[in-house]
Image (cartoon, rainbow, N blue to C red):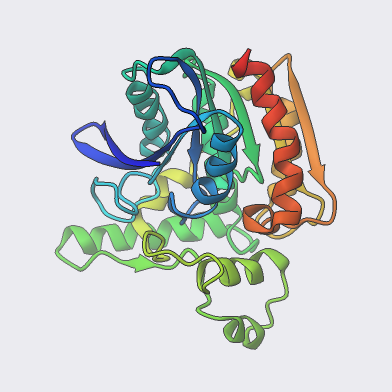
Amino acid sequence: MKNVTFKNRTWDVAAVIRFPAGFDASNTYPAIICAHPISSCKEQTAGSVYAEALSQAGFITLAFDASTQGESGGEPRFSEDPATRTEDFRCAVDYLVTLPFIDENRIGVLGVCGGGAYAANVAMTEKRIKAVGTVVATNYGRMMREGDLSTDAALNLLEVIAKQRTAEARGNTPLLVGYIPFASQAECEQAGVRDVDMINAVDYYLTPRGQQPGSPNKLRLTSTAAAIGWDAFHLTDVLLTQPLHVVFGSVAGAFGSYRDGFELYTKARSANKSLHIVEGASHYDLYDRPEATTKALEQLIPFYQKFLAG
């Protein structure tokens, strides 16, 4: 395992590259880019669980922090901009193809949650990616448009963003909000929140279970306007042609990875596509619970072996 950086435009993107046992730099290997969820970082599920397991299965893996987040550079800090997030993937491929031990014709991608939707989206136009795997892929644009499910939630949020951007243009401090609106399980209970995804988000990100310095639960509000007008799965029926494996749990929650998983699988043009529903698993079970992640990897590893290792 080695800490590395690669460029996106003018800044450094921080990443961790993992090597399989018996790695020999004189040989060439397939590689898998591992993308973290919205609000996450490379030290959490995409890196510590999936990249680690895939490297043990014989692949070189590259888990990176999204631009403006974690240890990566880029401004404005804590932005969640789909254009920049997808460009990170292209730049990751650019980095991998400069390494003599990487087979440029055997590069794949695995994304978790929002990282899964970004992965599918970028693969439509980045054909150096030869296989796409997603775990609880969540369409961030769809989430932002639905908001709190109230009438005109997206339009109301856009009005708030417009006013805030004007205020910041006039010198006000940028508004940072939390991806997760509750600071503890107690706050969830006080608010009457019972949704499995929201409760588990607090448990994963804000307790020792998954908490990491690179994931501080900070989001620059004005950056989300672009996401509201963006659809991760737009044109997947026309342009997403690579082999695709979609994983999500049978326990549906408010974040929508259950229905997004079905939508991605159904719409994708890919001639080789497969769907794996992990029974009894919720969204966050597939982040780090061994009973769920092991089942996901039991099918993900053969998928990548079939389409990348041969």
Above/below status of 175 relative to 138: below
Residue at x 31%, y 66% (from the top left corner): 175
Q: Across the whole image, how many numbered discs are drawn on residues? A: 0
From the viewer's perspective, tell me whether residue 52 is left or right of residue 92.
right
From the viewer's perspective, tell me whether residue 25 is left or right of residue 138.
left
Locate the C terminus and report the quarter of the image it occupies: top right
In front here: 298 or 126? 298
Which picture quadrant has residue 134? Answer: top right
Residue at x 43%, y 49% (from the top left corner): 42
Q: Is residue 78 in sight in this rendering?
A: yes
In front here: 274 or 261? 274
Which picture quadrant has residue 112? Answer: top right
Q: Position of residue 2 (x, y in %)?
A: 35, 41
Q: Position of residue 213 (x, y in %)?
A: 37, 64
Q: Position of residue 196 (x, y in %)?
A: 72, 67
Above/below status of 90 relative to 223: above
Residue at x 31%, y 18% (from the top left corner): 98
Above/below status of 233 relative to 74: above
